Amino acid sequence: MSNPFDDRAASFHVLRNEEAQHSLWPAGLPVPAGWSVVLDERPYDECVAYVDTHWADIRPRGLAARTGAAVPGREDA
């Protein structure tokens, strides 16, 4: 069986956790605890573009809050 995370022809979700970290997740797999879907099933390239736009500051939310101002482009909502 091939790895569903490597199949760029498959559909993905974009997930986000409480620390505002993002993940591409194969659409056919259950969403793990602690993560929420922020972009519903889309092609791989659309998901990557979403992450590039909405996760400019890759620091976990808690670390960013302790170490300085938010970086423009970061969406913490």
Image: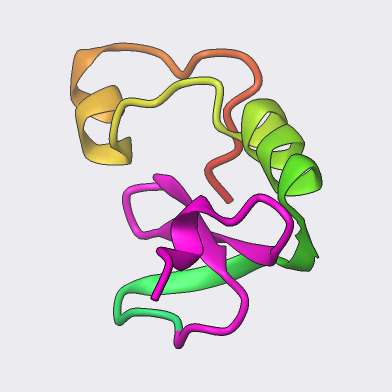
Q: Is residue 16 above or below residue 74?
A: below
Q: Is residue 35 above or below residue 75?
A: below
Q: Residue at x 60, y 38 (%)?
A: 75
The quarter of the rendered structure image containing the N terminus is: bottom left
- The percent coordinates of residue 12 (x first, y second) are 65, 64
- The percent coordinates of residue 66 (x first, y second) are 19, 24
Q: Is residue 71 above or below residue 64?
A: above
| Position of residue 1 in the picture relative to residue 73 (left or right) | left
Q: Is residue 44 above or below residue 1?
A: above
**Is 24 included in the stretch rendered in magenta?**
yes
**Considering depth in this image, is 29 or 3 the residue closer to the camera?**
3
The quadrant in which residue 73 appears is: top right
The quadrant in which residue 14 appears is: bottom right
**Considering depth in this image, is 50 or 9 the residue closer to the camera?**
9
Q: Residue at x 61, y 14 (%)?
A: 72
Per the rendered image, the range of residues in magenta is 1-30
| Position of residue 36 in the picture relative to residue 50 (left or right) | left
**Is 47 included in the stretch rendered in magenta?**
no
Q: For the view shown, which residue lies furthest in the front direction? A: 1
- The percent coordinates of residue 40 (x first, y second) are 74, 71
Q: Residue at x 30, y 81 (%)?
A: 33
Q: Residue at x 51, y 14 (%)?
A: 71
**Considering depth in this image, is 64 or 3 the residue closer to the camera?**
3
**Considering depth in this image, is 59 or 47 the residue closer to the camera?**
47
- The percent coordinates of residue 36 (x first, y second) are 50, 72
| Position of residue 15 in the picture relative to residue 67 (left or right) | right
Total residue callouts: 0
The quadrant in which residue 28 appears is: bottom right
